[in-house]
Image: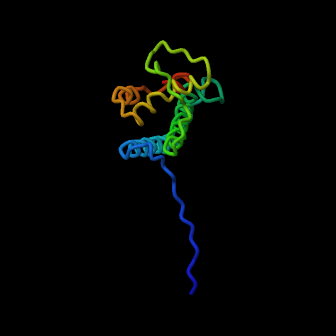
């Protein structure tokens, strides 16, 4: 018998992250995946006298896409890439986005701060976010 040739697959993780941060990132990714799987069987509500999804269903769909986007950013962060630059005043409610990068920073700010930096206030804001009823609310929170 000849030995079989096998290839080993692995994921490179940046040495810039501490073990606790890596664990937090994987926990957040798993939480997002569980939420996506739980919502996958939910019925889409249609608008009044319409075949199109209601505003609430559209907002929920955007919220689910947001979870997918969060996972993408978190995977990139594990590999040492920071795709969204966080402005210094991200926590200010007066920040008005002028670019798509700023919009993404606002939308993903609490996830980045809570997961990577361990910011307890950002974690509390993220958990306290109500179920979105409008698309913009689902995007930015």
Q: How many labels does the image show?
A: 0
- Say which quarter of the image contains residue 103: top right
Q: Quadrant of the N terminus?
A: bottom right
Query: Which residue is most to the left?
Result: 120
Query: Which residue is most to the top?
Result: 94
Q: Which residue is drawn at 55% across and 37% down?
A: 69
Q: Residue at x 57, y 18 (%)?
A: 97
- Say which quarter of the image contains residue 47: top right
- Say which quarter of the image contains residue 119: top left
Instruction: Depth check: give the residue in front, 16 or 124.
Output: 16
x and y, in percent, of residue 61 in the image? 56, 33
Query: Which residue is most to the right?
Result: 51
x and y, in percent, of residue 130 in the image? 42, 26
Query: Which residue is most to the front?
Result: 15
Instruction: Depth check: give the residue in front, 116 or 56.
Output: 116
x and y, in percent, of residue 79 in the image? 52, 45
């Amino acid at each position: 018998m000849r030995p079989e040739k096998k290839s080993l697959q692995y994921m490179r993780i940046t040495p810039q992250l501490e073990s606790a941060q890596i664990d937090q990132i994987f926990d957040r990714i798993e939480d997002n995946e569980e939420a996506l799987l739980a919502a996958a069987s939910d019925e889409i509500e249609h608008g009044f006298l319409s075949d199109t999804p209601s505003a609430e269903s559209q907002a929920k769909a955007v919220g689910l896409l947001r979870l997918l986007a969060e996972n993408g950013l978190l995977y990139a962060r594990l590999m040492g890439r920071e795709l969204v630059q966080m402005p210094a005043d991200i926590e200010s409610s007066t920040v008005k986005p002028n670019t798509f990068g700023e919009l993404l920073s606002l939308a993903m700010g609490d996830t980045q701060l809570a997961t990577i930096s361990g910011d307890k206030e950002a974690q509390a804001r993220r958990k306290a976010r109500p179920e979105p009823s409008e698309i913009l609310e689902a995007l930015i929170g």
